[in-house]
Image (cartoon, helix red, strand yellow):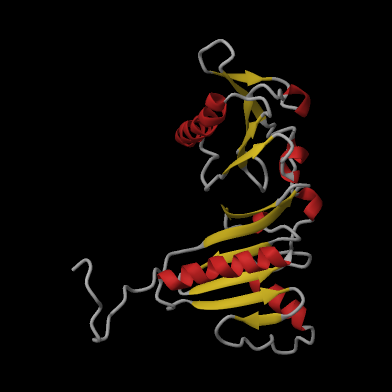
Amino acid sequence: MHGGVASGFHHVSDPLPLNIRKLYRVTLSRNTVRSNLVVREVPATASSLVEGDTYVLDKGATILQFNSKGSAGQERFKAAEFVQSLSNERKSQSEVIVYGEFRLSTGITFVPLIPGCIDEALSGATRFLNEFGENTTLKKADNTVTGLSEDRPILFRISDATGVATFNNVTPPTKASLSSQDAFLLDYSTGVPHPAIFVWIGKEASLNESRLALQYAQRYLYDKKITADRVKVAIPIMKMKEGEETSEFLHII
């Protein structure tokens, strides 16, 4: 029954889910004001693997963390924190293994090197990448934001200048189209491999515009998931104020 104190008897936990295969990417976006750590579910395919980030592959009975070369310490710590939360939810029934391009370590049990493999770093990277097929490699970081010609971001203005809140498309979707007097929504939900919805609040935007912006973003994303086949994974909504933009946002717009 709900509440009370657990007895001293042995408790049987629910069996581990066996049909899970989810990939999470942990990224650190930096700007001059602050850094933002984002844990984002991405398609569990080789095309989602990019140099310089940290990944978590949840297979149910096993949870794999991979620290790629060039990944930040904050990303690795956040990934470990996320892995631990998954493990705790399953009463520590999942085996946790941490791989890195520099060295190989495990969260619970030691995993020996691949027989005949002298390079320990190669062993760890290969074991994780082989989960996505033999000869899988990480994509170059320069390809992080691509496809703008095919997946052009879409910009919307949220304004109550007329006394009634409006939500209108703005072209072109560039920084020059942003106005300090209003709030804006930048749709990059089809971006590869970092889909996102950005909410930008101008310095002189009204309190009403600032409050409505997030509501419009949530409704917009909900409607988009219903009508667009391409929107299949969790897409974050990232809110920022003018002057505190993330490097990812500035790179896109």
Q: Position of residue 92 (x, y in %)?
A: 44, 78
Q: Residue at point 68% right, 34% down?
A: 151
Whether residue 187 is visible, yes or no, is no
Q: How many marks?
A: 0
Q: Position of residue 33 (x, y in %)?
A: 74, 47
* Rendered view: 249 above or below 102: above
- Which image quarter is the N terminus in? bottom left
Q: Nearer the viewer, residue 231 or 235?
A: 235
Q: Position of residue 155 (x, y in %)?
A: 65, 26
Residue 207: name its quadrant: top right
Q: Is residue 224 left or right of residue 102?
A: left
Q: Residue at point 62% right, 20% down?
A: 169
* Rendered view: 186 above or below 238: above
Q: Position of residue 45 (x, y in %)?
A: 61, 57
Residue 139: name its quadrant: bottom right
Q: Is residue 107 left or right of residue 119?
A: left
Whether residue 152 is visible, yes or no, is yes
Q: Residue furthest left?
A: 1
Q: Residue at point 69% right, 87% down?
A: 113
Residue 135: name its quadrant: bottom right
Q: Residue at point 49% right, 68% down?
A: 85
- Which image quarter is the C terminus in? top right
